[in-house]
């Protein structure tokens, strides 16, 4: 299967696409081509009529023409439609579209996007990701710090206090704390090194550091603004906890509350009350489920 995927340069969108492509590659041989979105020139209304130009248009071998083109991010919508029409390929969008949904052949989006009931739409628990569970290192812990977001009221001092309590309660755990692009400067300035805490800022990590670390970490705690990280930690089959912040009433926050109520993740208050992790965590591999679903759809065409 020849796959093209449109890249808008945003790590979160690329993570979703690569997760699906990796899952497809485990089922069937694939040949994958990344197309930076800035290379695709779509004239006004060209997305309606399949008019698009690539720098390699006159050189691209017909053998590399895609069977399916995948996109994520609003900036990819028009190029995805234009190229799929131009090349007679199927379009696959990994988000709720801002253009009319029936224009896309297949759509996959997190359940909080509330896609309509449609045979060519698939809702998933959280966004797709490329996380793989690995052999866990006993006594390992990871703390993932996000920052201000639209569904959680950020307070650096509150998170700092909870981090301090966590590493004190679990003093036998070797903790690694990492920040993100959204982490406020006041948090970074106040966080202190501890004997059982290693701090690694996101600027100092390689692109594969976080997936590799999450896959082998036994226990992962996440700030509730980092929704994608919560689902990645679950996919890595770690024991997952979330720190306490005021959660604003959004569809995203409702998903987090459901995970807590189902005891698939622990809240910070549960930790203090010595509530235990689930003995049999629910496996989560939405990239594989999406890949299986997509290949079945393509087989029926």
Image (tube, rainbow, N blue to C red):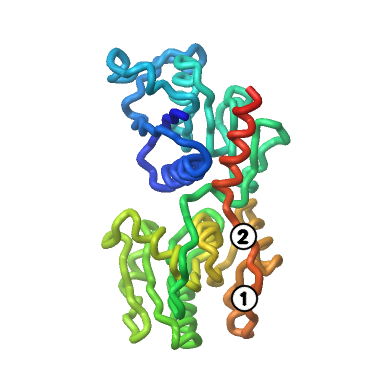
Image quadrant in which the C terminus is located? top right
- Image quadrant where residue 187 sits: bottom left
- Image quadrant where residue 95 sits: top right
Q: Which mark is residue 92?
A: none
Q: Position of residue 237 (x, y in %)?
A: 54, 64
The answer to whether 10 appears left or right of 129 in the picture is left
Q: Position of residue 215 (x, y in %)?
A: 45, 63
Q: Residues within 10 Å of mark 1 (few under 14, many from 20)?
A: some
What secondary structure is marked by label 1? loop
Residue named by callout 1: 277
Q: Position of residue 286 (x, y in %)?
A: 58, 49
The answer to whether residue 175 is visible is yes
Q: Residue at x 43, y 13 (%)?
A: 51
Question: Does 162 appear above or below 81?
Answer: below
198 or 298: which is nearer to us? 298
What secondary structure is marked by label 2? loop
- Image quadrant where residue 208 sits: bottom left
The answer to whether 178 appears left or right of 126 in the picture is left
Query: Nearer the N terminus, badge 2 or badge 1?
Result: 1
Viewer-nearest of discs 2 and 1? 2
Q: Residue at x 63, y 38 (%)?
A: 293
Q: Residue at x 58, y 66 (%)?
A: 246
Distance between the alpha carbons at the discs numbered 2 and 1: 14 Å
Residue named by callout 2: 283
Question: Does 245 appear above or below 14?
Answer: below
The answer to whether 259 appears left or right of 55 in the picture is right
Give the total of numbered labels: 2
Q: Position of residue 165 (x, y in %)?
A: 48, 84
Q: Residue at x 49, y 50 (%)?
A: 129
Question: Does 194 appear above or below 123?
Answer: below
């Amino acid at each position: 299967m020849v796959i093209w995927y449109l890249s808008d340069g945003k790590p979160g969108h690329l993570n979703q696409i690569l997760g699906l492509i990796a899952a497809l590659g485990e089922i069937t041989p694939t040949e994958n081509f990344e197309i930076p979105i800035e290379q695709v020139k779509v004239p006004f209304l060209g997305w309606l009529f399949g008019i698009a130009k690539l720098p390699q248009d006159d050189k691209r071998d017909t053998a590399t023409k895609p069977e399916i083109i995948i996109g994520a991010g609003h900036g990819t919508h028009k190029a995805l439609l234009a190229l799929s029409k131009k090349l007679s390929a199927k379009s696959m969008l990994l988000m709720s579209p801002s253009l009319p949904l029936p224009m896309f052949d297949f759509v996959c989006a997190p359940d909080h996007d509330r896609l309509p009931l449609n045979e060519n739409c698939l809702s998933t628990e959280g966004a797709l990701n490329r996380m793989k569970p690995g052999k866990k290192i006993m006594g390992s812990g990871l703390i993932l710090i996000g920052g201000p977001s639209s569904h959680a009221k950020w307070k650096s001092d509150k998170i700092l206090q909870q981090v301090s309590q966590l590493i004190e309660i679990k003093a036998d755990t070797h903790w690694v704390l990492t920040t993100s692009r959204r982490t406020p400067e006041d948090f970074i300035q106040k966080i202190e090194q501890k004997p059982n805490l290693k701090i690694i800022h996101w600027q100092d990590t390689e692109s594969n550091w976080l997936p590799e670390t999450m896959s082998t970490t036994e226990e992962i705690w996440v700030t509730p603004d980092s929704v994608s990280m919560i689902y990645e930690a679950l996919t890595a089959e770690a024991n997952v906890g979330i720190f306490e912040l005021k959660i604003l009433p959004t569809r995203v926050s409702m998903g987090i509350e459901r995970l807590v109520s189902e005891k698939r993740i622990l809240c910070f208050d549960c930790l203090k009350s010595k509530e235990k992790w689930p003995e049999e965590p629910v496996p989560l591999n939405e990239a594989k489920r999406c890949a299986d679903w997509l290949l079945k759809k393509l087989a029926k065409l």
